[in-house]
Amino acid sequence: MLNEILELLKQGKTFSLQDIAETMNTDIQDVKVKIDYLERNHYIKKVELHAGCGGGCRGCSGGSGCSKDTNGPIMWELTK
């Protein structure tokens, strides 16, 4: 399954964990374990896309307790 996940990521398309699980005919938890393994062994790296809040604040690290959801999708890219 590890090689199959790497082959999917080589396609350069966006896949959710659910998409990968359905393609591999397994559950999301199994995919998470495989993704974690690939990350720990530096085959892939996580890329978090942030949508941003649109301004007017001191930034997420400013300690202002911003309640806006600025997290975007999480993707992975190949490193090897």
Image: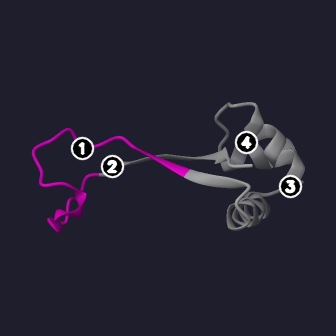
Quadrant hosting residue 12: top right
The residue that label 3 is drawn on is 2
Q: Nearer the viewer, residue 34 or 79?
A: 79
Q: Earlier in the sequence, mark 2 or mark 3?
A: 3
In screen coordinates, is 29 left or right of 48? right
Kind of residue at badge 4: Asp
Name the disc covering residue 25, or none: none
The residue that label 4 is drawn on is 19
Q: Is residue 25 visible?
A: no
Quadrant hosting residue 62: bottom left
Q: Do labels 4 and 1 touch, CB within 8 Å?
A: no
Q: Position of residue 17 (x, y in %)?
A: 68, 50
Q: Do labels 2 and 1 touch, CB within 8 Å?
A: yes
The segment highlighted magenta reads: 47-68
Circle 1 or circle 3, nearest the eye? 3
Label 4 element class: helix
Q: Is residue 20 visible?
A: yes
Name the disc covering residue 53, or none: 1
**Which residue is rendered at x = 73% and y = 42% of the image?**
19
Tell me the quarter of the image containing the N terminus: bottom right
Q: Do labels 4 and 3 touch, CB within 8 Å?
A: no
Q: Do labels 2 and 3 touch, CB within 8 Å?
A: no
